[in-house]
Image (tube, helix red, strand yellow):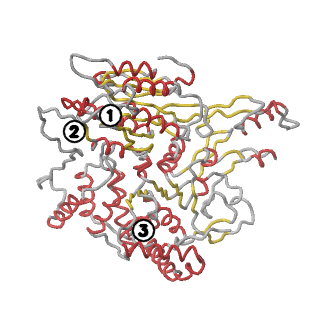
């Protein structure tokens, strides 16, 4: 039973999102659109609704490659057979699940035809199914790296090449890529991010009347989808006709050299490195003109194209969200209106600054208070030492920090003979059986082969940060925050999950539960006030509680930043330091990877952080050693009994 699709015309608001999707429908080679936004903001609804209003295409009935009828793929046995039937079909809309295997995406050996003795038998994958249509990926930022590599190759070449299982096949794979993502789950790889022609930020409306309309329409659709769809059929047909007309007009739309110079000027002023931005803006501006039934591009079209094509292509640092300086864009457009030569080198160039998000630092006071509360900025820390975690050998969720060959999803690197495989290598098994007895083909237990797959594993990095008065003294916290943010940069690049626990005053608190959004962790740490006493034992207790609630396969890595001067106990009748060591011993018994960064300063040092590291069986570093140049920290996982 076909699942009902919410009408595109019935979507309330989200005008920029709808415009971006329509542009991709007009110009399939635009590169697709990335939709970023919060949960429940109509990202998936709009993407799925687009396919329902696209004009139909001509294809051969039963063709899995979606071949163009007059140019069939030589590997398509349907299109190359006799008595083919051409029919009008909806544009393909293919959903790529996050858990898809590489074979399912690129295609694999057709076992049924291979067993019948046919050579080169190929079963098309999702890339073939999406040819001439839409490839949709929900939560695209969580897609595994080996699948991202496949998508990058197909998007760049417009073809899918399969070299495996004795097959050597290349077939067309030209599709519009639409991806959705929640920014709380982390960012995309830069290479894949640039492949998206357009990007749109969406958010649920805060206007009460709009939210009421959304709720009413959604309830009506869920109550009686057929009746609701019928109510919007006229608007859908009108939009479908508008799209068809725009597709016919698009090849005739012209863009003057003056506006092309404006596009180049805008990209240079925003310091966009990728030349793909200029090309996408050119195509998007022409598609906007076609959508409005015009054959000439205007400056307004160029401006709207820039708003969709540039935000995710600007040079930015980790934790900096993709955005476009609207004021600068307005000034560039205004200057272009006043001058016929927007690329004139003699024109004044606006200075562009990218101020770091910093908190106001109060003036230093010589008075030492029992419970001071200040917010310190972070000093820059260069050449941070990278953290490598050795895999435990158990399957983990996707990440980029360490390799593992014990995963059920990943790139196949080899096959081995195995009479009891849990991941059957079909091609190797069939080849072995055929070579063993070509005249009487029969698969036996001795022919079975196991696939060995390699993937990257993720980590859960729990930052336990001391924000007490002993740390804040002499603005030591500025250096500590700089070190933590540098560690977060490493986590950002490795796509780890991050949690933050801070302790000061009389208790510790979980500032940030485990999340892939290291941007949120960075924000919490920049705004973290310091001062007061040191409830270190409570922080260790919260760490144990957080670990007990984890039900995924992420490998935990605990990073403690403290001087170890505990002076607040959970039990008033217990010595704070002894209570801290008791909790540390409980953590050590779980045999987790840990790192203690000693932030103690001054001539006279108690060495409490060093003692804490010994009880935790953790690697120990001073804050100065952490930021040393050209060094690498290796945290050996103790689940296999490794020692430091």
> Farthest residue in the front direction?
573
Q: Of the residues under marks 3 and 1, which one precedes in the sequence?
A: 3
Which quadrant would the N terminus be assigned to in this image? Answer: bottom right
Q: Residue at x 35, y 38 (%)?
A: 507
Number of numbered discs present? 3
Name the element at disc 1: helix
Q: CA distance from mark 3 to mark 1?
A: 40 Å
* Mark closer to the observer (3, 2): 2
Q: CA distance from mark 3 to mark 2?
A: 43 Å
* Mark closer to the observer (1, 2): 2
> Farthest residue in the right direction?
440
Q: Residue at x 28, y 56 (%)?
A: 324
The reply to whether dot 3 and dot 2 touch (C-beta < 8 Å) is no
The reply to whether dot 3 and dot 1 touch (C-beta < 8 Å) is no
Using residue 625 as the reference point, say whether residue 554 is left or right of it. Answer: right
Q: Which mark is residue 18?
A: 3
* Mark closer to the observer (3, 1): 1
Name the element at disc 3: helix
Q: CA distance from mark 1 to mark 2?
A: 13 Å
Q: Position of residue 44 (x, y in %)?
A: 50, 62
Whether 344 is drawn above or below 534: the answer is below
Crowding at label 3, few (<14), some or many (≥20) Cα neighbours within 10 Å?
some
- In this view, the residue in front, 526 or 505, is 505
Which residue is tagged 1? 484
Q: Of the residues under marks 3 and 2, which one precedes in the sequence?
A: 3
- In this view, the residue in front, 348 or 609, is 609
Q: Give residue 166's quadrant in the image.
A: top right
Using residue 611 as the reference point, say whether residue 158 is left or right of it. Answer: right
Which residue is tagged 2? 376
- In this view, the residue in front, 193 or 120, is 193
Name the element at disc 2: loop
Q: Which mark is residue 391?
A: none
């Amino acid at each position: 039973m076909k699942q009902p699709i919410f009408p595109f015309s019935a979507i309330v608001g989200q005008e920029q999102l709808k415009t971006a999707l329509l542009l991709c429908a007009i110009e399939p080679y635009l590169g697709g659109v990335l939709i970023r936004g919060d949960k429940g903001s109509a990202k998936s609804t709009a993407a799925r609704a687009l396919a329902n209003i696209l004009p139909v295409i001509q294809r051969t009935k039963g063709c899995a490659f979606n071949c163009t009828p007059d140019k069939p793929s030589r590997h398509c046995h349907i299109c190359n057979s006799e008595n083919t039937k051409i029919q009008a079909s909806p544009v393909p809309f293919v959903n790529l699940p996050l858990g898809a295997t590489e074979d399912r995406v690129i295609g694999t050996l057709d076992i049924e035809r291979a067993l019948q003795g046919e050579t080169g038998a190929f079963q098309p994958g999702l890339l073939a199914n999406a040819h001439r249509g839409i490839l949709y990926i929900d939560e695209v930022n969580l897609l595994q790296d080996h699948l991202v590599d496949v998508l990058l190759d197909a998007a760049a070449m417009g073809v899918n090449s399969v070299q495996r299982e004795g097959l050597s096949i290349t077939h067309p794979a030209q599709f519009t890529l639409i991806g959705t993502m929640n920014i709380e789950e982390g960012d995309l790889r830069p290479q894949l991010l640039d492949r998206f022609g357009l990007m749109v930020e969406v958010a649920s409306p805060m206007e009460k009347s709009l939210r009421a309309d959304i709720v009413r329409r959604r309830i009506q659709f869920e109550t009686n989808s057929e009746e609701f769809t019928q109510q919007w059929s006229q608007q859908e047909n009108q939009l479908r006709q508008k799209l068809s007309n725009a597709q016919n007009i698009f090849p005739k739309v012209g863009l003057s050299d003056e506006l092309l110079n404006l596009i180049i000027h805008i990209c240079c002023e925003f310091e966009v490195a990728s030349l793909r931005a200029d090309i996408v803006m050119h195509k998007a501006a022409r598609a906007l003109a076609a959508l409005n039934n015009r054959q000439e591009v205007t400056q307004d079209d160029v401006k709207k194209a820039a708003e969709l094509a540039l935000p995710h292509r600007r040079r930015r640092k980790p934790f900096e969200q993709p955005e476009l300086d609207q004021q600068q864009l307005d000034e560039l457009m205004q200057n272009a209106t006043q001058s016929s030569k927007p690329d004139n080198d003699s024109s004044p160039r606006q200075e562009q600054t990218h101020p770091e998000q910093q908190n106001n630092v109060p003036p230093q006071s010589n008075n030492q208070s029992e419970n001071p509360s200040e917010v310190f900025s972070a000093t820059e820390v260069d050449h941070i030492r990278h953290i490598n975690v050795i895999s435990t050998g158990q399957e983990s969720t996707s990440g980029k920090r360490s390799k593992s060959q014990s995963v059920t999803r990943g790139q196949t690197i080899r096959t081995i003979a195995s009479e009891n495989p849990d991941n059957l290598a079909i091609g190797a098994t069939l080849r072995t059986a055929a070579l063993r007895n070509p005249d009487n083909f029969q698969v036996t237990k001795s022919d079975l082969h196991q696939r060995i797959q390699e993937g990257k594993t993720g980590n859960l990095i729990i930052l336990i940060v001391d924000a007490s008065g002993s740390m804040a003294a002499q603005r030591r916290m500025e250096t500590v925050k700089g070190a933590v943010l540098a560690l977060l940069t490493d986590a950002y690049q490795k796509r780890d999950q991050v949690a933050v626990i801070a302790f000061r005053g009389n208790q510790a608190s979980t500032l940030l539960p485990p999340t892939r959004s290291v941007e949120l962790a960075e924000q919490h740490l920049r705004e973290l006030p310091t001062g007061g006493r040191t409830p270190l034992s409570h922080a260790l207790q919260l760490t144990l509680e957080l670990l007990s609630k984890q039900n995924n396969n992420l490998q935990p890595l605990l990073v403690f930043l403290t001087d170890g001067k505990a002076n607040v106990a959970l039990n008033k009748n217990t010595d704070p330091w002894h209570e801290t060591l008791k909790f540390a011993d409980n953590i050590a018994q779980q045999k987790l990877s840990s790192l203690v960064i000693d932030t103690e300063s001054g001539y006279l040092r108690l060495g409490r952080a060093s003692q804490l590291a010994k009880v935790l069986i953790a690697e120990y570093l001073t804050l100065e050693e952490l930021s040393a140049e050209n060094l690498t920290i290796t945290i050996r996982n103790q689940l296999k009994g490794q020692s430091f």
